Image: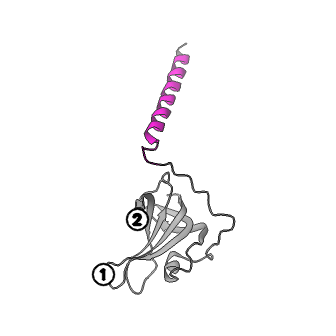
C-alpha cells in the first residue's frame, strides 16, 4: 500500500512541475511564439564550401541571400543579445584584417537556442546583410548578419 502512495505522490509532483514550467514559459501578452527554423528552401543558393565570414565581408554584398552550408562555420560565442527584438548570438571573426577594425558575425536564432559566452558551435543560416558601422575610426567595424539560422553547440 505504501508503494502506491509513493507512485501517486511522484505522479502529482511531475504533473505539478510540468504545469508550472508551461505557465512560466508561455508567451507574455503582446509576444508571439517563435517558430523553429525549418532550414533553407528547396531552391536555396549556397555559398561555396570553404568561404569564411571574413571572405563574405570582403566580397561586400555578393553573398547576400545565400546560405551557409552544413556543417556551417565553427565559431566561438562572444555574447548573447537582441537584434531587432530577436535573440542574437554575436561572434568575433578572428581572421586577420590588415586595416584593423573589428569584424563580427551576428546570428539571429530562435529563442529556444541555448548557448553562452565561450561556447564553441557550428553556425548555418541565410546571409541577410553585410554592414559597416561608422565609429569614427580609420577602419570601421564590419559585420555579417545571418538570419533563419541554427546553432549547434560543440561538445565541451
Q: Is residue 90 above or below residue 138?
A: above
- Residue beneath the point at 33% across and 85% down: 138
Disc 2 residue crowd, few under 14, some 14–19, many 20+, Cα 10 Å: some
Q: Residue at x 45, y 42 (%)?
A: 25
Q: Quadrant of residue 42?
A: bottom right
Q: Is residue 118 magenta?
A: no
Residue picked out by circle 2: 78
Give the labeled residue for mark 1: 136
13 in magenta: yes
Instruction: Residue 113: give x, y in percent of width and height.
Output: 49, 54
Separation (CA) of disc 2 from disc 1: 23 Å
**Side (left or right) of 133 relative to 128:** left
The residue closer to the viewer here, 28 or 58, is: 28
Which image quadrant is residue 38 in?
bottom right
Q: Residue at x 45, y 62 (%)?
A: 89
- Residue at far right of view: 42
The crowd level at tag 1 (other Cα within 10 Å; few <14, some 14-19, many 20+) is: few
Q: Residue furthest front?
A: 30
The location of residue 140, given as percent across then percent down, is 37, 80
Whether 54 is drawn above or below 42: the answer is below
Query: Compared to 71, does 36 lie above or below?
Result: above
In the image, which residues are magenta? 3-31
Amino acid at each position: 500500500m505504501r508503494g502506491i502512495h509513493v507512485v501517486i505522490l511522484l505522479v502529482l509532483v511531475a504533473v505539478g512541475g510540468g504545469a508550472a514550467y508551461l505557465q512560466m514559459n508561455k508567451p507574455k501578452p503582446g509576444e508571439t511564439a517563435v517558430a523553429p527554423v525549418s532550414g533553407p528552401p528547396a531552391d536555396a543558393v549556397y555559398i561555396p564550401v570553404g568561404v569564411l565570414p571574413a571572405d563574405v565581408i570582403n566580397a561586400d554584398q555578393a553573398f547576400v541571400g545565400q546560405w551557409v552550408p552544413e556543417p556551417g562555420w565553427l565559431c566561438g560565442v562572444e555574447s548573447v543579445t537582441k537584434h531587432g527584438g530577436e535573440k542574437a548570438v554575436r561572434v568575433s571573426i578572428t581572421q586577420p584584417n590588415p586595416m584593423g577594425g573589428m569584424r563580427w558575425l551576428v546570428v539571429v536564432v530562435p529563442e529556444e537556442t541555448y548557448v553562452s559566452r565561450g561556447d564553441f558551435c557550428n553556425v548555418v543560416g541565410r546571409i541577410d546583410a553585410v554592414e559597416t558601422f561608422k565609429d569614427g575610426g580609420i577602419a570601421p567595424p564590419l559585420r555579417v548578419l545571418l538570419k533563419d539560422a541554427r546553432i549547434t553547440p560543440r561538445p565541451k
